[in-house]
Image (cartoon, rainbow, N blue to C red):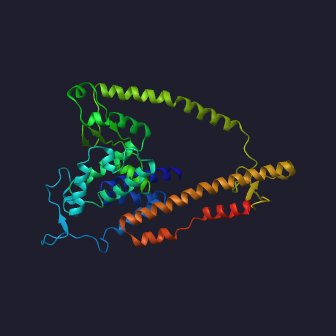
Amino acid sequence: MESNKDEAERCIKISISALSNNQTDKAKRFLEKAQRLFPTDQAKSLLESIEQNKKPPDGAERPMNGDGSGVRQRSHGDEAGDSATDSAKPYTSDQLDAVKKIKSCKDYYDILGVEKDAGEEDLKKSYRKLALKFHPDKNHAPGATEAFKAIGNAYAVLGNTEKRSQYDQYGEERAHPTRQQHRHQRHDFEADISPEDLFNMFFGGGFPSRNVHVYRNGGMHFGHQHRAGPERREQRDGGFALFVQLMPILILIFVSALSQMMVTPPPYSLSHRSGAGHINRRQTQTLKVAYYVGASFTKEYSGKDLRNVERSVEEDYISNLRNNCWKEKQQKEGLLYRARYFGDSDLYQRAQRMGTPSCSRLSEIQIMLHG
């Protein structure tokens, strides 16, 4: 069953990538496969969103009727690389003007519309607003896809402290390079995640891919970065350097795992585990948390030792509640983002009704402990 779960997660990853590329049928096919292998709320929610958005919602924009007002229709030659399906989708003059504005920006700060001393929250706020506005599913104006990628790349660089520092140092030189700089000095600021995956992580989860997009020599470049010759050797050297940097962490993980193997397992479990002998149910005195112990527990633990065990039980229980509460909030927030993005009122209502039982229980415990 665990192998089915891994395969289902892989299918969900493929479907999210397909949705980012407007491949709805492919996304639906892999989501259905994921549900057959290992049903999850995430796959179910995505399937429902796809079904809900097959029909345009009330009040959606329609192609113009020939009177020249309102919505404009793209022609097949409007944007090189666009599919015939995308070119037939409507867009407004405001959307087209917004795309032109993004493509005319001179640097990443200009793209995100923030000052050079903007903090992390300002960057996130600006990215969220622009990413929703220019996402290919929302904006079908010529060049919208490129603008969306530029926005994602801008945030991926400025949102990374090290890359931002390098960009601040070399950006102006690269925007107006001299011939000598072209020959001897190139500073490419690469994002480690594609704009589509970045969007998925902000609005409901996603997985990094190998696509990278760069802003090079004053212009925007998108797609896969192909390396050859010395650059390929630099990549291998960089991989070895990364391995050397990670070595202390790997050693720490190994030592930690080894120490865990040598530590005596706790005499209790928060769930019934017949294999470990934890079959007798008990409750802690303070918070009334249920836990399970072996047959000889009462003989081995009493008085102060018993209080220490129950304190550990309650700490583990509260830690689990915090983790589950965080997951519940993330799931609810993800549904709310999707509902707002797709304009799905039913999904929005469902997200609003979604409970967070672990968070509620955590609040009850805090009241019990602190009065």
Q: Position of residue 352 (x, y in %)?
A: 49, 69
Would residue 361 be found to the left or right of residue 46 on screen?
right
Q: Position of residue 344 (x, y in %)?
A: 38, 69
Q: Quadrant of residue 371?
A: bottom right
Nearest the viewer among 294 and 251 is 251
Q: Position of residue 205 (x, y in %)?
A: 44, 54
Check the image and report above or below for 18 versus 173: below
Q: Is residue 302 visible?
A: no
Q: Is residue 70 visible?
A: yes
Q: Quadrant of residue 166?
A: top left
Check the image and report above or below for 119 versus 338: above
For the point 70% across and 36% down, the residue is: 262
Nearest the viewer among 232 and 334 is 334
For the point 32% across and 72% down, the residue is: 57
Nearest the viewer among 25 and 45 is 45
Q: Position of residue 71 (x, y in %)?
A: 20, 67
For the point 36% across and 34% down, the residue is: 169
Residue placed furthest toward the bottom: 58
Would residue 96 be found to the left or right of residue 48 on screen?
left
For the point 31% across and 35% down, the residue is: 188
The total of numbered circles placed on residues is: 0
Nearest the viewer among 127 and 82 is 127
